[in-house]
Every structure is written in structure tokens, then in C-alpha cells.
Image (cartoon, rainbow, N blue to C red):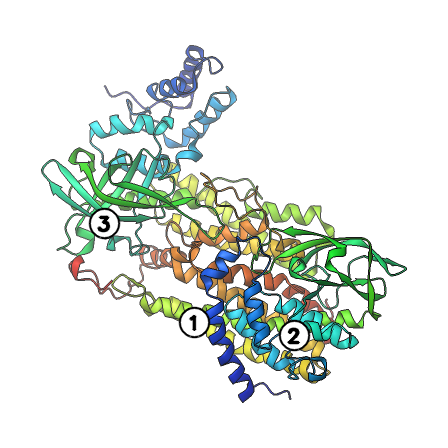
Amino acid sequence: MTDLLYGEIEDDLRAGLRGMLADHCGWQDVLAGTEADEPSDAALWSALAGFGAPGLAVPEDRDGGGATWRETAVVMEELGRVVAPVPFLTCSVMATAALLAADDELLPALASGERTAVLAVPFGTAPDAPLPDVRASGGRLTGEVRDVADALAADVLLVPAQDALYAVEAGHAARAPVTSLDMTRRLGDLAFTAAPGRVVATGEATVRAALTAGAALLASEQLGLAERCLETTVAYVKERYQFGRPVGSYQALKHRLADLWTSVTQARAVARHAAACLADGDADLPVAAALAQAHCSQVAVRAAEECVQMHGGIGFTWEHPAHLYLKRAKADALALGTPGRHRATLARLLDLPPA
Amino acid sequence: MSTAPPGADELERRIAAFLAAHDPARTERTAFLRARFDAGLAWVHFPEGLGGLGAPVALQHGVDEAFRRAGAPTNRPEANAIGLGMAAPTILAFGTEEQKRRFLRPLWTGEEIWCQLFSEPGAGSDLAALGTRAVRDGDSWTVDGQKVWTSMAHEARWGILVARTDPDVPKHRGMTYFVCDMRAPGVEVRPLRQLTGEAEFNEVFLTGVVVPDEHRLGEVGEGWRVATTTLMNERVAIGGRAAPREGGMIGVVAGLWRDRPELRTPDTHDELLRLWVDAEAARLTGERLRQALAAGSPGPEGSAAKLSFARLNQEISGLELELLGSEGLRHDDWTMRRPTEVDFTRRSPGYRYLRAKGNSIEGGTSEILRNIIAERVLGLPGEIRVDKDVPWKDLPK
């Protein structure tokens, strides 16, 4: 069985990160950022790089931190708690997983946070879904890819084209920003016209590894988000008085929050299993990642929806952080395959075919 | 004079005569609407002299249809929903003859827009806890406090206002209902931006606002009883609209399913059909409620309609996003705007998903509606109340 607990190193990492994020990622800043031109928070990204977060899972001889995906998952939890507008999932998890699989020369630059790369696939692409149709001819790429997460924040685009993965300098692609449901992780549309690319790896395995790593660790972000929504909601229903008593004294709310807490404990176990499978190269990884997305997506959405509902009117306003969580939670549920898509994957992996 | 109320034939005759005398194509809009009101063809169930003829409310639809077929201008009911749906029935039930004559005609024609000054930051579900104070000073009242979730306040000429006039008695007994002049000194309206990025609503700050006693609606201390009439009408207005099959949010997703075969999966198919069944059951229930209402006054059944409406809108819009996958991650616009009506169909799926979250909060949360059903319909014992017999000023807040 995989180790589902947090170790001392992970606890220390979390404590340090949480303190740093409290200083650098307040929700008012995140909210203001959703209406700014910049596609992500560059100052926060530098602070994370200073912390060594982007390269945690990269070996030391590639300028990384020499830790594992388990520690990286803790970073995802903490970033999820504050809906951080940085390309950590897309660059430090997905692109890094692809480059690790290929042992590519870009690894040190990504590990240090000096450069950012993202996988050029629609953000809704599940690990076992078809890839976009980009053509490669003599090392030059032509085609369009829509809905790419953090496309505008990236220096390098990792583009699956025919039977290989190419690295393309972002300047060689036409990039159009997309008004996104979740403006803390914005999409962009990409167009390549005979763009020069360098082969990172042949075959699809590298891309699939990146998508699977993304699905496995997105669950930790969803866990952090759900946990934060639960905490703020519990705090609010204790202090909000209606009818002369705290609204949290009503069983109708208490029971829903108790159910939500139960779901969050399950999300934690499921997310930890996925992170451990990814870290250990466990054979259960495809199941663990699909399970993580089928389960944690729904827990995060429910937590964010309950957060809005139980805050009442104030939770429906722009000047309250609840909507940042709601938009991120729903976008995360669509990202890397919907829960329904992952249930279908599980049906295939577990030999539970449809009727 | 006590003639029998007119039936459908008589109304038809009067409409024909009215249209012959007021050619819709050649009569100025406001003049046409005023004349229609004066002819008793505005809301035919209202009394004579107040825009009606004392006819059965069930005949209203036919009257509106006849005017529509004739190409007559409408009173743009969507722009004055609070006025028509809530202020008017309350004024009719509690207003003096003078108040009815002053307010109802420009309300119906849309010359004067109305808003509702009820909710406060500290008084949402527990509206009766509201703290906006009205202090009597001879023939007028001075009002101080803050209201919130006021749609149309920035366009409104008048607001229906509930304020605390006696803090020393238990909360339900110390309120009075007023009509507030939104142009009076001391009324400040600020947009309240919501999670969709736009601001349908406002915060209204009332500072030393003078309200003449002749703008009081109902007796001093009777504000809660008056407000209850308004609120029952609100719940009907929010939940009880007539709609054709697939007329609501389900129609949007059903259309998407038919048009986009590539999006279909077995999983979402089951979910779509489950929601289709629920939506159709809710639609028929709403239609049945409307038919019942035509015969009498609104009851607690409106709460059930609003409860299902909120749940369905939320689940259906959530499914739509899942169906769309990556495409659902795109949004149309976060710009701060001031819409005067909610249109679920013309915006992006993300807007529908987010806006629908308000359906279980605005106009009575789903939790409060369940309490109403449990206690008023099913007769279950109420929650233990700690606030019933305590003077308002001593309540924990």
C-alpha cells in the first residue's frame, strides 16, 4: 500500500509555504489580478522560485530540489488554498513531467523558475483523450490548439504533433488570450504556421505521462481548495447570527458541513494515493489518477458551491473571495477530463464495461 | 353602482373600442399606456379607477395577448418587476385611496420604476431583524440605515421600505412600512458587484432621509404584516413563471445535445434525461400553481416552485459546462455592467452556472424556503426560537 500520510519534510514545507503565501498571495491581490492584463502573478512566481518550488521533483543534478511528486503535491494543496495565479500545475507539474520523462535539456531552466513551459493541449484533455491535430514537417509545426492553460504565461510551448513532442519558443506561435471562466488560470489560443520546433521525445508516452501527472496532482489542488472553503464556511456560520443565533447552530447546515468534512477526508486519502503512485511509479497510477479526478473534482466543486450558499448574499458578491474558489473549482473539474470522463476511464481500466 | 364584473366577451368588446379610439400605430407610447390604464384594461383584476375592472385575474393573459396582436406598446414589465410584482399588490392591499391614486398609474405605465428596500447586511434570511431606524418627527419620519441587494435602485423613483420604528418591542412588532422617495436628500445608491462581474443590485445608504407620514403604508408597527404580502408575491414572481416545454435552462442544454453529437457521452445522457424529467415536472407544477393562483391569492406553494427552480438551474448549468469540457472553460465577459434584467440564454455557459448560484439565495434562501414548507405546509414544529419575545434592541447580532 502507498504511504498516505504526510512526513516531517512535507509538514515543514507546508508551514513555510503557507507563511510565504500569506504575504504574497492575499485574496484581494488575486481578485485584482483577474482584471489585470498580466496573465499570471510574476512576483509570486519569483517568490515560489526562491522557495525552490518549481524544481522540487527535479533531480539535483538537473538543478532541481531532488524531492518527489509527494512534496510537489503539498505545494499544489497550498496553492489551491489561495487560488494562486501561477503556472505551477501547467509548468512545474505537467511540462516538468514531460521533460523528466524525456530527460530534456530544458529541465534546469524550468526547475529554477527561470523559464516556463506549458503543454500545448486544450486544458480539458484527459490523459487518455485524443490529442490536437498539429502537423509536423521538417521540424516545422502548423496547426491550431485552443484553450491552452497558461499559454500566455509560457516561454516555451511543448507541442504534441503527429508522433512526437516538440519544444517551440512561444514567440514563434500566435497567441490569443481567452476570457476564461477561471481568470486565475487563464487560457490562450495558439496558432502555429511553420513554427520551428525541436523534438523533445518521440511517441505519445511523454505527453501521456504529463497529462497523467497533471491529473494526479490536480487532485491535491482540489483538496487544498476544498479544505479552505470548508474552513472559511465553518468560521462564517459560527459568527453569522440570524434569528438570534449563529446560523451554524441549525442542523440543516451542520449536517451538510459534517458531510463535506467527511468528503474532504476522503479527498485527502485519494489525493495522497495519487501523489504517492506518481512519486513511486506505482502500477496503480492510471487508476489512482482517474479515481483522484473522478472524486476530488466533485468534492472541490461541492465545497465551493456550499461556501457560496452558506455565506448567503455576501458569498455572491465580487468583493468576497468565494467566487474565486467557485470558478477555480468548476474549471478544475473540467480540466484534464471531467469526472464523467474519468469514470469511463475507470470502467475500462477495471473491466467494468457499460451495459 | 354594483354591476357584475366583465367577462371575456365584454373585455374583448372594450379592447376593440379602445383600440378604435387609440390607434397603437399613431398614439404616443406613454399616452397610450395612460389611456389603457384609465380604461381599466391595464390589470383587469384591479378595481375600477385603478387600472382595472374588477374582472377575474385569469382573463389578464387574454387582454395582454389582444394588445400584443394589435401591435400596442407594452409597459415593459421586465424593467419594473418590483413595482408590478411586489409594490402594486401591497399598495392595493394596504394603501389609502390617495396612495393608490398617486402611485399605481405611473407604476403600471412604467413612468415610475420601483425598488425594494428590505434586506440589510445584518438582516437577510432574518429580515425581521432589520435595523434601519425611522424616527417620527411630527408629520414626517427621519430614516437612517443601510439596505442591500436592491435591484433597480439606480433607476427607481420610489422604494418600498421597511424600517424599525420601535426597538423596545420584539422584532416583528416594531417595524413600519413606507414608500421612500429615491430622489430625497440622504439617499445614496452604490452598485453592488456580484460574482458574475456585473451589478444588477445596489447598496442603498439612507442618511437622515425625511419620509412624510402620508407615505406610510399600513399602520405604525404593522410593517411586518405588510412586508409579508410583498414577499409572498416575490416568491411567486421568481418561481412561478409560465414556460413552454424546454422553455427554461433545460432547453439550452437539450438544444446543445441535439446540435452537437460529438459532445455526447452515456454518462451525460443519463444526467440530461434525469434533469429533463425534473425540469418538466417542475414546469407542470408551476403551471398548476399559476392556475391555482388565478382563482385565489398566493400561498406557500410558491416556495416549492422557487426551490425547484434554483436547484434545476444550478444542476442544469453545471451539466452544460461538463458537456462542453474545454470549451466550457471559456467565458464571454467579466466587465462591470448594470443589467436591468437577467437573461440566462444570451450569455456564456459559465455565466449561467455562476448566476444560477444566486437563485438559491435571492428572494429567500433555499434553506428558509424548506423551513417554510416544513413549518407552514407540513405543520412541523418550528425551530426553537430565542428571539420571539426579546426586545429587538437586546437581540444578539
Number of numbered discs present?
A: 3
Residue at the image position 63 percent from the left and 58 percent from the top: B322
| Element class at badge 3 | loop
Name the kind of residue labelled 3 in the image: Thr
Q: Is residue B135 above or below residue A196?
A: above
Q: Position of residue A262 (x, y in %)?
A: 48, 76
Residue B277: image x %, image y %? 57, 52
- The residue identified by callout 1 is A231
Nearest the camera: A84 or A336? Answer: A84
Residue A152 found in image quarter? bottom right
Q: Amino acid at mark 2?
A: Ser
Three-letter code for the amino acid on which mark 1 is drawn: Glu
Secondary structure at badge 1 equals: helix
Q: Which residue is at the front of the view, B93 or B144?
A: B144
The CA span between labels 3 and 1 is 32 Å
Label 2 resides on the chain identified as A
Q: CA distance from mark 3 to mark 2?
A: 57 Å
Lateral position of residue A184 relative to residue A215, left or right: left
The answer to whether B87 is drawn above or below residue A196 in the figure is above
